[in-house]
Image (cartoon, rainbow, N blue to C red):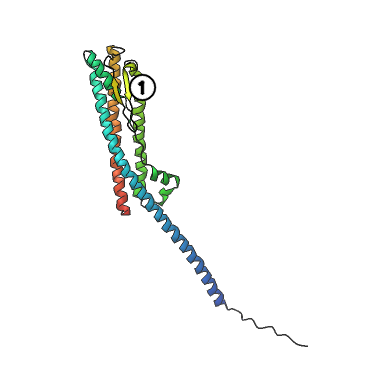
Amino acid sequence: MEVHHHPEVEKKGFKEYLLEGLMIFIAVMMGFFAESLREHMADRERETQYMRAMVADLQKDSVQIDNEIAYTKHAIVALDSLFQCLHSPILTDSVQLKLYQMDGKSGILVGFEFSDAASVQLKNTGGLRLIRDQEVANAIIHYWATRETVKIDANVFNQNVQDFWTDGLKIFDVYYIKYLTHPDEKEADLSVEPGARLLTRDKMQLTEYANRTGSLVLMLKLHYIQSLQWQKTIEADLEHLIIKNYKF
């Protein structure tokens, strides 16, 4: 009978097992570190993209705010002129015609849309967490808060303009007024019939209307235009801070 001999299997020593285990551990850790590095680089790239988009929005806002300040100053002049004319001691035919013309140019609305692309992305994707510099993150949050103040001041003024229009219907007859509107313009061209006369010449009613006109002037001077100028400063500081930190 033949006897089959099994080949001898060389047994690994403890050190070999330890070395193999160490190599596997190192391979796993290297993979982990590589993935973490990729995620870190991707986060830094997204952070830079967000900041570039934020600077672009701030630069667009700067132009918008300058235009809105100029428009608001124009509104202040128009309202103040109406306020003065409403206090005319004698309501001659020419004064009444002038009141029609001034009133038609005074009941204007304010406000504009902020450039929002970067802010929407940061809020909706949680991108604010990617911003490493806490000073920049805090400045962005402050910028968002002050934007809301500008919007609130604009809304309050516009709500009061609605009441201004309602009171005006008791004084001015729209039959004499023609508006020629143009696309992309806030203010319409105004044409008033030469024979336009006020519905009332009651001094008390006209004084009350003048007071409402004066209150609109104060809202623009003391609140809205101040908010716009403050917002312009905040946005300029934020833009400078981002450019300094990200070296654009």
Q: Residue sitting at 36 percent across and 22 percent down? A: 163
Where's the N terminus, which quadrant?
A: bottom right
Q: Residue sitting at 34 percent across and 25 percent down? A: 161
Question: Which element carries disc 1, helix, strand or loop?
Answer: helix
Q: Quadrant of residue 236?
A: top left
Q: Quadrant of residue 225?
A: top left
Q: Residue sitting at 33 percent across and 46 percent down? A: 56
Q: For mark 1, does the 10 Å Cα neighbourhood hold few (<14), some (14 to 19), or many (20 or more) residues?
A: few
Q: Quadrant of residue 178?
A: top left
Can residue 229 be seen here? no
Residue situated furthest left in the rendering? 89
Can residue 64 be seen here? yes
Front-most of 150 and 180?
180
Residue 194 pos. (x, y %): 26, 16
Residue 218 pos. (x, y %): 28, 27
Q: Is residue 247 above or below residue 77?
A: below
Count of marks placed on residues: 1
- Kindly identify which residue carries mark 1: 163
Front-most of 92 and 33?
92
Residue 91 pos. (x, y %): 23, 13
Q: Is residue 32 above or below residue 47?
A: below
Front-most of 30 and 172?
172
Instruction: Please state which amino acid type lies under the numbered disc 1.
Output: Asp
Residue 47 pos. (x, y %): 39, 52
Residue situated furthest right in the rendering? 1
Residue situated furthest bottom in the rendering? 1
